[in-house]
Amino acid sequence: MSDSPKKSTPNPATWVDEHGDVLYRFALLRVKDPHVAEDMVQETFISALQGLDRFKGGSAIRTWLVGILKHKIIDHFRKSSREVSTTDLTLLTEEPEEQVYHRFGMWTWKNRPQAWDDNPDNVFNNKEFWGVFTGCLDGLQETFRRAFSLRELDGLKTDEICKILDITPTNLWVILHRARTKLRNCLEAKWFRDER
Amino acid sequence: MMNCKEITRLVAESADRDLPFYQRMRVRMHLAMCFLCRRFTKQLELIRKISRVAGGTDSLLADGGVLQGIVLPPDAKARLKEQIAHNKPVE
């Protein structure tokens, strides 16, 4: 690393302008609260400065910063998991919402899954769609949202998520099932069913 | 015979754990017959795909990407720049 050219050494003075917005969006998508997201970005920069000698010139500086940010978010989840999950876990004992969608175990005609206009080209590069998606994500209870984002946005294994959120595997399965169902219903109502 | 409610639960859970063999078979048999559960299954798969795109950094940069137009507030930027310039820990 020592013989790498001067050019590739990171220049922290440009970090905020070059990477600040992306890091902020990355955090905001996962923690929802803008102030918490700002804190996460701030902590990331501070850790990065302190660990600058550990930066391997080979990986892009942004990838390195995002990696640090990911850990900051997980730490934040871990620290606040107990207070959040006790309130949300009481929801698990209540009548599940998706009960409404079935009668005698079958789909009701009114609430059956609708056909979607699911051509990925219509969603992946569509600012409006992403607005609906983040809106639906924000509609989930905090623990559901955290579990879903760790699982589906970041692709973590379920046993890692159980440790971070301090919940049992059985509870995690129920939480993820509920989160997936709620998100599906929300996307259908607000986007896919829409007669655009 | 498993019903749609159980099948949708198992379909969702199969993304997070390995279902026992007999459950996998029953899901497969049910899906062969039930177009609504097939539709539901395909939709969950699409949501997984969408979520993975949303979770990557590329989508945060693209013009039509996630949270476009959302920027770090100017006062936060100024504060962060100052902290970096002085390289001092927060508060």
Image (spheres, coloured by chain):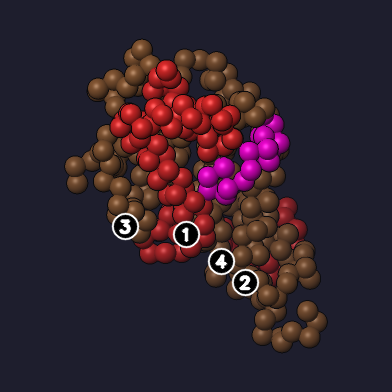
Residue at screen point 44% across, 49% down: B49
Q: Which residue is mark 3?
A: A121
Instruction: Name the colour assigned to chain A in the rendering.
Output: brown
Marks 4 and 3 in Cβ contact (< 8 Å): no
| Chain to which mark 4 belongs | A
Position in image of residue A140 (x %, y %): 47, 33
Q: Which residue is mark 2?
A: A60
Q: CA distance from mark 1 to mark 2?
A: 16 Å
Q: Which residue is mark 1?
A: B60
The chain drawn in red is B
Position in image of residue A95 (x %, y %): 47, 15
Q: Are marks 1 and 2 on the same chain?
A: no
Residue at screen point 78% across, 79% down: A1
Q: Which quarter of the rendering shows the N terminus of chain B?
A: top left
Question: What's drawn in magenta, residue-wise?
Answer: A151-167
Assess disc 3: are there few (<14), some (14-19) or many (≥20) residues with their C-alpha within 10 Å of its C-alpha: few
What amino acid is found at the position of numbered circle 4 in the picture? His
Q: Most extreme residue toward the top, as rendered?
A: A104
